[in-house]
Every structure is written in structure tokens, then in C-alpha cells.
Image (tube, rainbow, N blue to C red):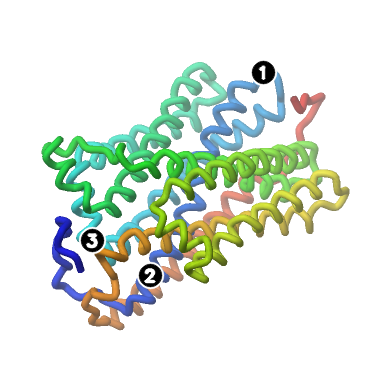
Amino acid sequence: MLTTTPIPPIDAMPVPGPLWLMRTLLLLTFFLHLLFMNTLLGGAAVALVCHLRRRRSQLAAQLATEMGRLLPPVFAFTVTLGVAPLLFLQVLYGNLLYASSILMAVPWFSVIVFVILAYYGVYYFSLRGTKNPGGATAALVPVVVLLAAIAHIYTNNFTLMLAPERWSGLYRKAPGGWNLNWGDPTVAPRYLHFLVGAVAVAGLFLAIQGLRKRKTAYGRWLLEQGSLLFVAATAVNYAIGFWFLVRMPKAVQMMFMGRSGLATVLLGLGILLPLAAIAHLVLAKSNRAPVRQASIGIGAGLLTVAVMVLMRDVVRNAYLAPRFEITALPVAPQWGVILLFVILFVVGLATLFYMLRAVARASGPKPVSGTVSAD
């Protein structure tokens, strides 16, 4: 490990499990968190747009009302599922994450305030959306802004932890913890890639809802709108993803250009899977029996998210490779603790599945009566 950068020493307390297991749990729990996090941010934006269009389209009004019921539990799942990946990240990269968090302590701690305010806004929209449309709009706009701000803070921290060479300069510039990682050329494309990806995942969520209610006019409209949203957002994200790639350091770029077999395969999958998802969702729109095509498209979209999680891990380790290797961490497995975690994790997933089924049943197919506009 080089000593020219101010990287804090590795924690003397050993990692309580094999490194491969800790990394697997980090990626798995982050994948689950990412699904709900994207659905929350993208879904809040969709709810806002549909709420503003409620007078022009009864279908949009129905979707806004339905999103009002769904956003509070999605918010709860997002926060709950975000705990585990953050803890695993601290176990494996704690000396880096703590340092970057201290440098940007003020915005980092503001995340707590932003989450609380956004939570209140979501509940206000859920409870008062139909009774006080103007107030609901005034509540939902800050929710979208706050969630986007939280994403921006996380993007800054998770990129700053990868750049120890910048820490000393940032500390001298603002020792009070007011730093952000503005100087990193990957922050903007990485952030936009996440925001647009959240819209794409929200489109998948609408498509799933549409499949469940496909026998109604509302369900068919949901499937169509969700597919269009995913296709449009994914097309934009191809351009942003290319921008993100070219702004990475040359050594990291070359990994995806053939120097690393794993990175190259992941890049190929990251390009091809969204294309497969787009093709099948487009076919589902014009198919009288769209279940198979839409299901394949949704599956390819979810696999794309999983591939992005793996690519994120590859990029993180590539950035740190000259200065930090997690293989240097001391390991002393505590199998009893690991077994307890696995049991609780499985029980938690079962509980989550049960709650999702309950929410799905509560928002089951409800035909739209009267004449509707699909504008």
C-alpha cells in the first residue's frame, strides 16, 4: 500500500466473515436497496407529473392516487434495506468511507434531515392528495428535490472515498466539513446515470403493475406508459453511460475495453440487456397477449440493474487498486454471528415478500368507470 496519500490505517478489528461472503452480501443487499430506492425516486417524479395532469387524464389521476398509497411503504423499504449495504461497505471500506464522510460531514449529516422531510412530504401526499391537490403538489415537489439532493450527496461521498489524493487539499480548503467532490469529472455523469436509471426502474414498476391489471383499460395504459418510460430513459442513459465511461481514468476504461475479462463481459451485458428489455417491452405493447414479452422485458431490465451493481463494484476496486486492497483486511470468521444474520436476513426477506403481497392485493385491479382520456 502506498503511503503518499492520507489513507487511515486498516481497522485492527478483523472482518467477521470471509471476504467473498462479505462482498456477496454487500452486492446482494445493495441490489435490493437499489430497486426500492430507484422506484421511490422515479415513482415520486411519476406521481408528481400524473398529479399535475389529473384534470386532463382520469388514468393519470388514478395512477397519482395509487402512487400516493404505494410511496410510503416503498420509502420504508428503501430506508430499511439501505442499512445492510451501508454496514457491509463500512466493514470492507470503512477507513475510506469514514474519511470522505468527515470531509463532507455537513451535507452527509443533512441526509438525515432530508429523509425526514421527504418522508413527511410523501405521507402528506398520500393522505391529502385528493382532498387538497394544491397542497399535495406543494408537498411532492420538495420530495422529488430532496430525494434528488440525497442522491447527489451519496454520489459525492462514494466518489470522494475513491480519491484519497484529493483529501488533503479539500481539508485545507474547508476543514469544517463543507466539502463536496465537485472536482471529480465522473460525479456529474454518475449522478445523472442514477437519476435517469431511477426513471427507467419506475417504468419497469409501472409495467409490472400494468401486467397485474392487464384486463382493465387502466392496466393496459400502465403497461404502455411504463414501457415508454423505460425505453426513453434507457435510451438517454446509453449516452450518459458513454459519457461516464470516457470520464473515468484511462486505466479503468481499459479494463472495460478488454484488459479485464470480467469488466468487459459486464460492459457487454450492460449494453445488450437493456436492448433486449427495450425490444420485448416494445413488442409487448403491440401484442394482444403481452404477458410473455413484457415478462422477458422486465426480467432483462432487472438483470440490467444487477449488472450495474457488479460494474459499480469493479469500478470501485479498480479505482482503489493502487492504494488499497480489501484482501489486506484481517479476517476472523464468526460463524455463529453469520448464521444468525443469514437466518434474520431470510426471515426479513420473507416478511418483505409478505408485505409486498399485501400491498399488491390492496391495490388490486380496479376498473376505471366512465369515459377516460389516455392523454
Mark 1 lies on residue = 55
Asked whether residue 353 is in view, the answer is no
Going by the image, does 99 lie left or right of 240? left
For the residue pair 249 and 43, the one nearer the viewer reads as 249
For the residue pair 265 and 326, the one nearer the viewer reads as 265
Q: Indicate the amino acid at tag 3.
A: Gly
| Quadrant of the drawing holding the N terminus | bottom left
| Quadrant of the drawing holding the C terminus | top right
Determine the secondary structure under disc 1. Answer: loop
**Is the residue under label 1 in contact with that under label 2 (CB below 8 Å)?**
no
Depth-wise, is mark 2 or mark 1 nearer the camera? 2
Question: With respect to residue 327, does 236 lie above or below?
Answer: above
The residue at 44%/29% (across/down) is 124
Q: CA distance from mark 3 to mark 2?
A: 13 Å
Going by the image, does 182 lie left or right of 350? left
The residue at 26%/66% (across/down) is 324
Mark 3 lies on residue = 94
Q: CA distance from mark 1 to mark 3?
A: 50 Å
Percent position (x, y) of residue 215?
Answer: 81, 45
Asked whether residue 217 is in view, the answer is yes
Q: Indicate the amino acid at tag 2.
A: Arg
Percent position (x, y) of residue 56?
Answer: 70, 19
Residue 314 falls in which quadrant of the image?
bottom left
The tag earlier along the polypeptide, 1 or 3, is: 1
For the residue pair 272 and 36, the one nearer the viewer reads as 272
The residue at 37%/39% (across/down) is 152
Percent position (x, y) of residue 87?
Answer: 30, 61
